Amino acid sequence: MIRPFVKKISEVEGYAEGNATFLAVEEAETISSNYIRIEKGETTELGNHPDEEELYIVLGGRAKLKLGDKTYEVGIGDVVYIPRSTDHQSTCISDEDYEFICVANWPDKLPK
C-alpha cells in the first residue's frame, strides 16, 4: 500500500552531489521525482522517454534547454513540460548552478 510522507530534499541521499530521487517509483502510483543540479558548462544526457511525461520546475541558475527541435533559455521560476518521446537536454549557462525538480509521470501505470 502506498503511504503519504514528508521528506526534506536536502536530507535525501545524493542531494549533496546534485542528483537526488526524493520520490521513487515504488513510493507512488504513477509518478517519481528528483532534484538535479548541474554546474556552469555542464550538459545533461540527451533524454527521450516514450513511456513518461516530465515536468521541470527551475529553482536556480539558467540553462539552454533543447526541447525537440527548439532551444529555450530557462531560469528561476520557469516550469517546463516535456511530452513523451521528446528529445530534451539542458546545458547550464549561468555562473550559479542550474537546479531543478523533475517530476516524471507514467500514465500507463495507473492502478487497476
Image (spheres, rainbow, N blue to C red):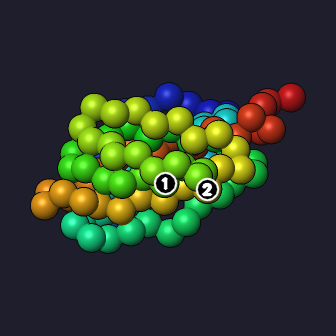
Q: Nearer the viewer, residue 53 or 65?
A: 65
Q: Splitting the image into 4 quarters, where does residue 111 fall? A: top right
Residue at left 58%, top 61%?
47
- The numbered disc on residue 87 is 2
- Seen in the picture, residue 17 relative to 56 is either above or below; the reply is below
- Seen in the picture, residue 34 relative to 103 is either above or below; the reply is below
Helix, strand or loop status at disc 1: strand
The reply, left or right, for residue 102 in relation to residue 3 is left
Instruction: Please provide percent x and percent y for residue 22.
Output: 42, 48
Residue at left 27%, top 70%?
41
The outermost residue toward the front is 70
The outermost residue toward the left is 95
Image quarter (top left, top right, bottom left or bottom right) of the C terminus: top right
Q: Splitting the image into 4 quarters, where does residue 27 fall? A: top right
Residue at left 43%, top 66%?
44
Q: CA distance from mark 2 to mark 1?
A: 7 Å
Image quarter (top left, top right, bottom left or bottom right) of the N terminus: top right
Q: Is residue 49 visible?
A: yes
The reply, left or right, for residue 96 in relation to residue 74 is left
- Circles 2 and 1: CB distance less than 8 Å? yes
Task: Give the residue at mark 1.
Answer: 66
Helix, strand or loop status at disc 2: loop
**Amino acid under label 2?**
Asp
The reply, left or right, for residue 102 in relation to residue 111 is left
Instruction: Please provide percent x and percent y for residue 18.
Output: 30, 62
